[in-house]
Structures are given as C-alpha cells and as structure tokens.
Image (cartoon, grey):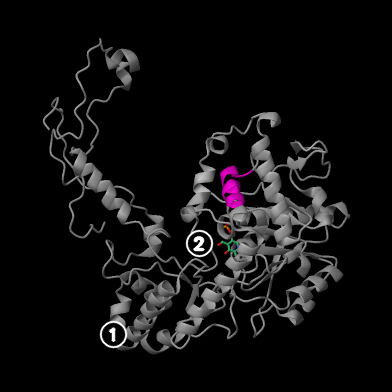
Amino acid sequence: MVRSVDFPLIFERSVPGRRGVRPPVCDVPVQPLADLLGTENLRTEPPALPEVSELDTLRHYTRLSQRNYGIDIGFYPLGSCTMKYNPRINEKVAALSGFAHAHPLLPESLAQGALQLMYELQEDLKAITGFHAVTLQNVAGAHGELLSLMLIKAYHESRGEGAKRKVVLVPDSAHGTNPATAAMCGFRVQSIPTDSEGNTDLDALRAALSEEVAAMMLTNPSTLGLYDRNAQKACELLHEAGALVFCDGANMNALVGIVQPAAIGFDCMHLNLHKTFSTPHGGGGPGAGAVGVSERLEPFLPVPRIIRTDEGRYALSYDHPHSIGRVHAFYGNFLNLVRAYAYIRAYGGEGLRTIAEHAVLNANYLLSRIREAFPPAIDRICMHECVVTAQRYKQTQGVRAFDIAKRLLDYGFHPPTMYFPLIVPECLMIEPTETESKQTLDMFANALLTIAREAMEQPERLKNAPHTTPVRRLNEASAAKNLVLRWQGEVVYPQEVPACAC
Ligand SMILES: Cc1ncc(COP(=O)(O)O)c(C=O)c1O
C-alpha cells in the first residue's frame, strides 16, 4: 500500500492510553457486561483501535475527506454518464421530514403528498418526452433498459409473436448495458455498425431486419456525442418490420425542452433521472431510471401505477391485467424522484431548455478549444459531449489516452471517460455539462493542451503520471480486484487500557 504524502496515519499517531473523550464517572449502579451479554460474547482483548485525542481524530477525518474528488471540489468531465452539479435545494427538499421519513407502507390516505409528487413527476416526464405513459419504479438506467425490453417482449407475446422475435439490434457504439440487457432478457444480440457520419448505418440496418427482430436499442444523442440523424428513419424501418424501438435516454441532457423522443418514433425510453434531472450518483447509486412508453406498450407497465382519481385523490392502481408485475419494491428510489421533481419544478420548461442549450454550447466550446490537439472522432457539431481521439500521441510517442487521463490528475482535474465508445481508438469522451463556466472550461482546455505538448516533448512524464497525488499509478486491474480498504499494517496495542491518561 502506498502511503499518504507526509502525514502520519492515525495508527502511527496512536499513543497507548490517549483518549479523545473523558466520560463522567458513572454515578448509578452498573450492571456487569458479562450479565448483559453473556461471558461467551465478551472480548478477551480490547479492539485494535488507534488511541488518539479528539483533535487528532478530527484532523484524520478532515484530511481523508479532502482526499476525495467530487463535483463539489472541481470539474468532473466524465462523458456518457452525466455528472452534473446538483443544486442544493433538491437535497433540502428531499430531506423534508414528510418525504424523508414517509414509510412505504403508509395507507394512501396518509401518503397523498408523496403520491401527488410522483403523479406530477410522471406528467412532467410525459410532457418532456412526448410519451403516453411513464413509470417511476426503475432504480437505474440499466434497470429502465431491462424493463423496456420486458415490455417489448410482453407486447410481442401478446400478439403471438414471442417465439419468433428473438433478436435485438444494438449499434456498435452502444453503452455496454444495452447488449447486456438484451442478453439478460433472453434475446440474441446483433450489432449494427455506425456510418462514416456517426449515424446508424441504414443499409446495414435494412440488411439485418427480419421477422426475427424484436427491437432495436438506439441511443440518441449517441455515445459519440452526436444527434443520430437516421434515428427517425431507423424507427420507420423497424416498425415496417413489426419490431419496436427503445431509446437509451441516458444522454437526454442535450435534448430536454428541444426534442421529444416519442416524436422521433421511439416506442419507449428510459430517462436517467439521476443524471439528466439531478441527483448525486457517484459510486454507483442510488438512481432512478423512469421509463416512458407509447400507447401500445402501456398495458404492460408495472404495477402499482400511480393515478389520480376522478375525485382528485391520488392512488396506487393494481387493476392492470396485462401488467408484467413489479420490477422493484415499493415505488422505486422515492427520494431521487423528489430531487428530480424539485429540479424540474425549479427550472420549468424554459429553464430546462436553456440547460440543454448550455450543455451543448459548453461541449462545442470545449471541443473548439482542444480540437487541434485532440481531433473529434467524427467532425460534426457535437451535442452535450464531445468524443475525441489521442491516437496521434500513441502512434508517434507511445502515449496512450490512459496516460493523458492520468496526467490530468496532476493538473487537478478528474479524467474524462476513456476508451468508450469502443469504436474510437484512444478515445477520450468529455461532457462538461451546462453548469461549468467559461473560465473552468478554459482551465481544463489549457491543461489538455499543455499535456498534448508534454506528450511530444517529454512523453515519459505522462507514462509515469500521476506525480502529485496521494497514490501514484496503480495497477488498475489488481487495484479493482484486490481492494485494500483499511490499514493492514502491524500495530501492537496494549492489552489493558488504563482508565484515563489524556
Ligand atoms: C448511454 C448509457 N446508457 C445506459 C447507461 C446506464 O445507466 P445506469 O448507470 O444508471 O445504469 C449509461 C450510464 O452511464 C449510459 O451512459
């Protein structure tokens, strides 16, 4: 394990008998622990904990917290997976006791506020996407993908075509969750290439269509950060072949208030509420992957559905005989729904459109600053993210996109997504999001341009980066597989702890 730069670990600061608190002497009779717990449950030795003062403890945790990198510290330009700033008002609203402490088994009569919020969020998402109905049960984008394919499967089965429609088409630029979802759902995956302009290759699509095709999973904007100009035609072709089209909506940040995916011809889509509509989601969760569907898929939506009765009350409705059933306990990650609702209501229609416009503007500005050093994979106006290649440095200097990403750490930036989409060699995928200022984008662009110069002049500096971080370059595979999450050094502790020796 590589040590932190120069500050002793909390274990090294430990002094036998040192204490952070001095509890008052107990003035009531104390029942012996052995009577309470049973002798067999008592420790024979004290735990191997560091013995430190309150101040040492405070500094230890404060120091640790400062080693974290997050959107609250600096620019976080991950592509594909929007890591945007989440306004604090959303957290405040989600922490309101009526929401945060609502029990999921509350009777409907006592949960009217929560049900109303979910109902209105469904309505807002219908307006944003143009779909006929929305469910909020899903708790991740990939979960929304799964539900969408389950609905499509149920649709084909209801028409007696379940047995023959076994193939799902997935573009070669797709996020890995797409083919994985199709396979999990029991479909055979067939890859569809991207054409030279970054759109779905329509000739290849035509050639792949048959009565066996159940659906296509299409990401728009694509993971190349481009609007798929062939999406509408692709939907038409699939419908003519009796298949349906799912839209991977993880990139909706570019389209909110501008394009309704249902109008393009999609039959269903997932929305990553935890990306587009603002929830902190580092470290894998919790998420919310709402799904919107067209009229023909509505009967199969999961129950319970959240409805408004003729009397204006909100209710959970189970009376949907064709429903595929539940896909999650209760109603999804409710507090993420609260955050998304707060976000949507705080900005309103005009505000959301402005957000999308700024996201696209920022990505294009950044691309214009770095394109000489890092050319775009496909030379078009990009959407909310730009996909560039560092191939030139690999070919001439042996410097990989990976080395460039590591060097960015020395300049104080979180690296962008690397090596995705898979079809772009030495790929860097950068999504600045709408909230970053021109100054931040310039700082990031300047860092990338400096690194590009370094790649030509001192390539070894990049190959050994990072140089300034608490831990240097790790073997990523073994770091991920053999996690070292706690201090495992040899520490000798006293067997007996004196009462107090602060
Ligand atoms: C294009 C695309 N699709 C699907 C997903 C999966 O979303 P989630 O991580 O919420 O499961 C992602 C996540 O980054 C994505 O970028």
| Callout 2: SS | loop
Q: Position of residue 193 (x, y in %)?
A: 67, 78
Say whether residue 333 is magenta: yes
Q: Which residues are magenta?
A: 332-342
* Secondary structure mostly taken by the magenta-highlighted segment of the chain: helix
Q: Is residue 397 above or below residue 44?
A: below
Q: Is residue 425 visible?
A: no
Rendering quadrant holding ligand 1:
bottom right
Q: Residue 458, labelled with which disc?
A: 1
The amino acid type of the residue labelled 2 equals: Lys
Q: Is residue 421 above or below residue 141?
A: below
In this orientation, which residue lies closer to the viewer: 296 or 324? 296
Snapshot quadrant of residue 81: bottom right
For ligand 1, tell me if the residue under mark 1 lies within 8 Å: no
In this orientation, which residue lies closer to the viewer: 347 or 163? 347
State the residue at coordinates (76%, 45%). 324
Left or right of residue 190, residue 3 in this image: left
For ligand 1, tell me if the residue under mark 2 lies within 8 Å: no
Snapshot quadrant of residue 172: bottom right
Q: Residues within 10 Å of mark 2 (few under 14, many from 20)?
A: many
Q: Which residue is mark 2?
A: 84
Q: Residue furthest right?
A: 159
In this orientation, which residue lies closer to the viewer: 102 or 468? 102
